[in-house]
Amino acid sequence: MNILITGGCGFLGTNLVHFLAENRPEYHLTVFDLLTYAGTKSNIKRLISEKRVTFVHGDICEPGQVSSALDSGIDMVINLAAETHVDRSIMYPADFIRTNIYGVQVLAEQCRSRSISLLHMSTDEVYGSSDDDESFTEETLLQPSSPYSASKAAADLLLMAAHKTHGLDVMIIRPVNNMGPYQYPEKIIPLFIDRLSMGLPVPVYGDGMQIRTWLHTEDFCYAMELAIDNLVAGGIFNLSSKNEVRNIELVKKLVAMLEQSEDLIRFVDDRPGHDRKYSTDGSKFMNQYGWMPRFDFDKALKKTVDWYRANPDWLKKHHTKEFEEYCRKQYGSL
Ligand code: TYD
């Protein structure tokens, strides 16, 4: 099978490309990536030089570029190209509308006209914040709170419309928060590992009592492998785990693992529109594929911290002018 992975140099993309190259050598993998601030080509340099992956520099919003990449006999597109950071979506919503909505529409049209399957990555954030003991199913009303989650919800609706109208062979996955190697250090886990390793304070939004559900990228990749082999056309699936953890608990664990003092924890202004809790019911995917996450929260966090500690240069490489500028805007003089 010939698979094109958009955003294959980003966080989930890099993890999936490594996983499939290792576990499914019979697939031919093409990475299609614009290499924006969060995409790092060197993540997959070895695989490109060993000719296990073909790299194409391109933008999902450019139909001509997508079209020529698909003309190399692609059977399936996995769309991991997206603007993903909620805080940036509040600062620069137009970028999110362009890539996450318009770009997805371009992919849908290009796939449909060639009868190529599309496995699209959405998010649990499309449902908005959950009340205390409520877990969202795939049927729950979409009530996104941020420009990011609204753009992802819009893309899901466009894809389902393309499935109904044109028979687009599309499957949508809505995963919980992922942790693992190669995550750009604007997200809480790599950002806090980076700052704590330098002895710098870490900014906890609001009261830190918000709850996120976590998955290790290895479990994510293993779920993707199952979906690739048996795509359910028109199917929407939550991808979830039991690892529901309050931000403050996560931060305290990071502080302990990095042997720092809790004095470095700073409670700062809350994120506008901050969802208190994400909790999704993942039983539909589990029943369909017999998938269960293998990593509980503590094992996943330890494995993640170990990777960043073993790869300090990867984090250092991301201390660019752009990143410093973003941190200044987001965190002021912290
Ligand atoms: P994040 O990693 O941005 O992922 P998402 O918003 O997609 O869930 O944030 C995870 C949680 O951590 C979220 O509740 C916001 C919080 N957070 C902080 O408290 N401080 C920070 O500096 C960041 C980046 C996030």
Image (tube, helix red, strand yellow):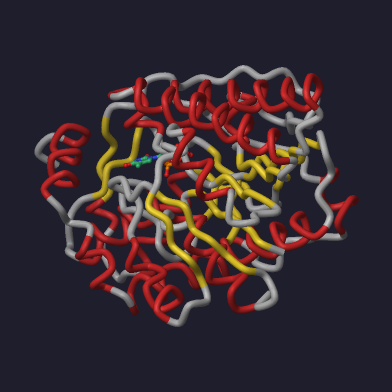
Q: Quadrant of the N terminus?
A: bottom right
Choose between 122 and 258: the one closer to the eye.
122
The quarter of the picture where residue 305 lies is bottom left
At x 20% / y 51%, what residue is drawn?
201
The image shows residue 2 at horizontal and vertical percentages of 66, 61
For the image, the number of numbered tags is 0
The image shows residue 310 at horizontal and vertical percentages of 34, 79
At x 26% / y 60%, what residue is drawn?
194
Q: Quadrant of the C terminus?
A: top left
The image shows residue 259 at horizontal and vertical percentages of 30, 71
At x 84% / y 55%, what residue is drawn?
230
Q: Ligand 1 appears in which quadrant?
A: top left
Choose between 181 and 171: the one closer to the eye.
171
Choose between 205 and 10: the one closer to the eye.
10
In the picture as drawn, the residue positioned furthest to the bottom comes out as 50
Query: Is 327 situated above or below 305?
Result: above
The image shows residue 127 at horizontal and vertical percentages of 64, 25
The quarter of the picture where residue 290 lies is bottom right
Query: Is 79 situated above or below 10?
Result: above
At x 51% / y 50%, what residue is drawn?
69
Query: Is 41 situated above or below 140?
Result: below
